[in-house]
Image: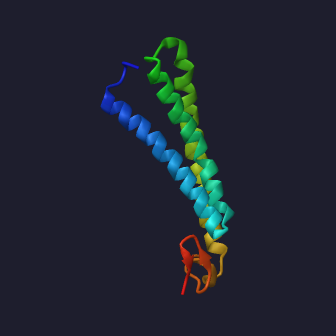
């Protein structure tokens, strides 16, 4: 735990919390809009979260050589996460191109119920 300074730990932990919050918010957006592609993006974010947790775990135990496999796992999860995020973004882009003009913004359609109430 002494391998990193307190401010560095604050950045590491807050970044993991922020990533978890982003996953949850994107999932909620997918539920509210009914667009399953956004929920796919939240799943695509999970490998990067695993990588971040590997890095935090390795640092928590003061970077021992016995846990060097965590560094390899973290690097692998970063690559996998970058690929899954790229695919999820492409999937969202492709689905947006297929929608008719009237469906571009489901939260703004007149009379539709949203998370903040009906639109006028």
- Where is residue 52? Give x, y as percent: 50, 35
Q: Is residue 51 left or right of residue 3?
A: right
Q: Please state, as top left, top right, bottom left or bottom right, where the C terminus lies in the image.
A: bottom right
Q: Looking at the image, what colour scheme do you see?
A: rainbow
Q: Name the residue nearer the viewer: 117 or 27.
A: 117
Does 57 sit above or below residue 101?
A: above
Asked whether the viewer can see residue 94, the reply is no
Q: Name the residue nearer the viewer: 38 or 97.
A: 38
User: How many labels sit on residues?
Assistant: 0
Q: Residue drawn at (57%, 50%), measured in percent from left and top?
A: 85
Q: Name the residue nearer the viewer: 39 or 91.
A: 39
Splitting the image into 4 quarters, where does residue 98 fall?
bottom right
Q: Name the residue nearer the viewer: 89 or 62.
A: 62
- Where is residue 86? Give x, y as percent: 57, 52
Q: Please state, as top left, top right, bottom left or bottom right, where the N terminus lies in the image.
A: top left
Splitting the image into 4 quarters, where does residue 50 fall?
top right
Q: Residue drawn at (58%, 86%), measured in percent from left and top?
A: 110
């Amino acid at each position: 735990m002494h391998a990193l300074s307190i401010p560095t730990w604050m950045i590491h932990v807050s970044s993991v919390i922020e990533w978890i919050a982003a996953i949850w918010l994107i999932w909620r957006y997918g539920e509210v809009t009914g667009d399953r592609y956004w929920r796919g993006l939240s799943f695509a974010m999970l490998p990067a979260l695993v990588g971040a947790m590997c890095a935090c775990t390795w640092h928590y135990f003061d970077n021992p050589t016995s846990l060097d496999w965590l560094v390899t796992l973290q690097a692998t999860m970063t690559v996998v996460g970058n690929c899954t995020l790229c695919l999820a973004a492409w999937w969202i882009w492709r689905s947006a191109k297929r929608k008719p003009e009237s469906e571009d913004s489901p939260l703004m359609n007149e009379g539709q119920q949203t998370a903040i109430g009906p639109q006028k």
